[in-house]
Image: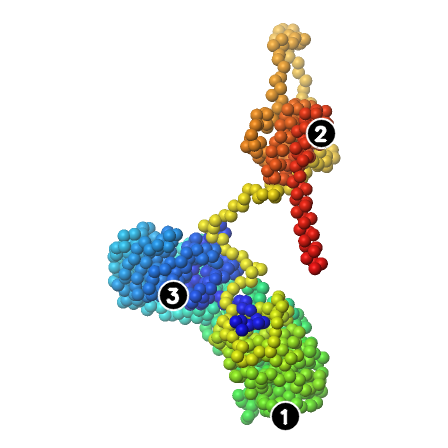
Amino acid sequence: MSSSKIFLQNRALGYVSNEIPLVTRYINLRRENLIITCVGRAFHTYSSDRFQLLSVSPQHETDITCLAADSYLVYTSCGNQIYAWRRGIELKHTYTGHKAAIKLLFPFAANLVSIDESGTLKIWDVKTESIYKEIQLDFTATAICHPPTYTNKLLIGSSEGKLQLWNIKTGNKIYEFQGWNSSVTSLEPAPAEDMMAIGLSNGKIILHNLKFDVSNITFTQDWGSVTRISFLIKRQLMITGSPKGTVVVWNLEEGKVDSLIIKAHHGPICGLQCLPDEPLLVTSSSDNSLKMWRFDMSDGSASLFKIREGHFKPPVSIRFHGTDGASILSSGNDSSLRVFNTVTEIANKSFGRASYNRKASKKKGNKWADPLIMPPISTFTSETTRDKEWDSIVAVHRGIPTVTTWSFDKSKMGEHKLCHERFKKNVSGQKGISATCACLTHCGNFAVIGYSSGHIDKYNIQSGLHRGTYGQPTAHKYVRGVYVDTLNQIMVSGGSDTFLQFWNFKKLNLLSKLELEDTVSLFSWHTESSFLAVALDNFDICLVDIDTRTVVRKFTGHRGPITDLTFSPDSRWLVTSAMDSTIRTWDIPSSSMIDILKVDTPCVSLTFAPTGSYLATAHADRLGIYLWFNKSLYNHVSLRPITEEDQITEPLPLTGINQETLECPIDEDADEYISKVQIENTITMSGLNDARWQNILNLDAVKKRNKPLQPPKAPAAAPFFLPTVQSIDFQFDLNGVGKTDSNTKAIPETLMQTVFAQQLLKATSLNDYQVLFDQLKLMGPSALNYEIRSLSPEAGGTYELMVKFLELLKQVSTSNKDFELTQSYLGVFLKYNGRALAQRPEAINSIEPLSKNNAWEQLQNNFLLCLSIVEYMKNN
């Protein structure tokens, strides 16, 4: 086999960042900053506004070693190759020429500067991919920066402590700074001119004047070397990162520490950047998290604003929760419980870390290491029946007898800690006891817990009270698995004594036993079919029918301890994983292996989606959760029994994004796609608002509807005055009465015509008609209605104008452009001028070409053809 017959790689969930520093870029078209993080062989692009994952880049050949960006492109290095990406997903350029691995990248105007492990500095022309200049450095470069106002200059720091200022246009070294006998770890331009912030490995931050080679001020942080530096310019703050996860905020005006963010991350601060013109700070770390901090506290300090994170230690157990297959619960070695969404990463949540005293831990915040954190969750079980009423998750912790409850609905740890009194007392023989397995009943009311001491206890979830014990004094030597059937009638337990025991759930008494070939390792069940899969310590799997209490199937083939089992939703397949790094699929009806998949690292936990669409796996030493498509849902898959020789090695799924929620970031230099003006044998709409043409035919009705119920009142009549003659006696001036102007002339016909009508009479070519039609498109409904009505002789127009307008419509309609406007304008024209046209035979002749234009008939025929083809395919 070249690949798995059933499962296809989909994508990995839960990856956010690694040790490569984040970069930010401002996109003018989006008017926001984009945040880019590295996750192994790909990089993620997040929006700063919603902290939403916008895109995931294609996979590189090996892990990304360096990341940089400008407003147009994202640059990555992989080995000795450099790649330039557009929109975060499209490979635009490849730069080849380095002979050693690349360690530094720096975009500089139209150039890209790169430095490799051998000390070779290359300056690339971004567009032509050619090398503009090459320089061999005489030290080990560790940081690179461009001092503002220093044209064509780059400042390069080294592990030897020296700094060099280079002119990249001429390739000359301008000046060398002797340094401070400590490796340079970070360079960042300060807000003041000629000033540069220099971070050192000894924890010092030097604000150095490059022009005079003088250090103005020195800061020292107590949390190790300076990993990153950034400035919040409006508040005169400098922010630095440390390897211990602490962020230090310095007040530049007072020259002292302004505030601290203790344990901002569980790992070193790898990326740190203030967003321009905003009181926001973005940090990333190798602890697989990306955080945004907002400086909004009353004392001027920062608070956590937004977060994207996954497990910072590998997952231990994963299970789908609910029936829609969208939520995956995951417990990790970091003592946290999380939910990952298979549809969108926005719905990912953290339930927090398990704590002996959650309220006390919350008061401590993230200032100091919390001694109240509980051991990691080794296994858990969940039900949705009582999700809204009380806790719906029961978690077993490694090495302790206390079992915790969690609420999926509230996304937090519950109030109950289930632990029997016998384990709270320092009784001889009860030390070192731990809970090993748990089962939550289908009704969501009870939890059954097994212990390494052999005890099995039943608890009420709502109250957290103990409700009974199975076995006197114990049920097994060491309990490995417990299960309760759907109706709460039978409880099944298995342990290190090779027996499966069937108990009456309510009365707590033993009903029967079933002896197996070897000791029990773990359980997995399918509720609807009453199947119980039992993994044994001899690497075999037994399938037990709960109703008949017999072993109905046995599967043999694994060569290492079995780590997990899961059923397909229809209970036809059983999927198992083991420390032999294989994932095997067994067909239950035929009792045969039908698929075997060998992976790079052992699978420690797996779960099948209730919808059957995905198989989710967690692997040793991997932080993510890996999704595999079930190909049998979408294609016909021919399955047959296979042997060990048919196994294939399949790489794990890579990071990706759900295509249904994909939103690609927009680059400034993105070429706008301009579609063709007209496609042959098609009609083209104008794209105007519907209100611009739909209501033209009914404009009179619209005006009548909008007419006020009471007409506006006429203004009061002005006083009536008659002209008078200046004289002693009062008399009227009647000189102008009865006289006529003999020079009065008839009004020219052209003065009664609109500007549009005058231009229409002069139109002769197709271009002239198109210009006039474009003028009509700019008019509103009322103006357009007036222009068309004024063409008739009754409104001051002429028959020649009407014929010209028909010619205009004919010329436009033959091009099949602005189809709906042409039809609408013709309808208005005929409505007001149809009777006048009917009286002139020569005008009727001009209408005939329009009536022969069968554009709609052609379009209708195409519609009918498509409908008939679709109907035929549906019926066959």
In the rendered structure, the answer to whether residue 758 lies left or right of residue 253 reads: right
In the rendered structure, the answer to whether residue 869 lies left or right of residue 201 reads: right
According to the image, label 1 marks what residue? Answer: 473
The x and y percentages for residue 5 are: 57, 72
Q: Closer to the N terminus: mark 2 or mark 1?
A: 1
Tell which of 401 and 720 is nearer to you. Answer: 401
**Furthest residue in direction top, as rendered:** 728
Q: Nearer the viewer, mark 3 or mark 1?
A: 3
Question: Residue 834, which numbered label?
Answer: 2
- Residue 643 in sight in this render: yes
Amino acid type at mark 2? Gly
Element class at badge 3: loop
At 66% from the left and 84% from the top, the residue drawn is 552
At 59% from the left and 74% from the top, the residue drawn is 607
Element class at badge 2: helix
According to the image, label 3 marks what residue? Answer: 79
The x and y percentages for residue 243 are: 39, 69
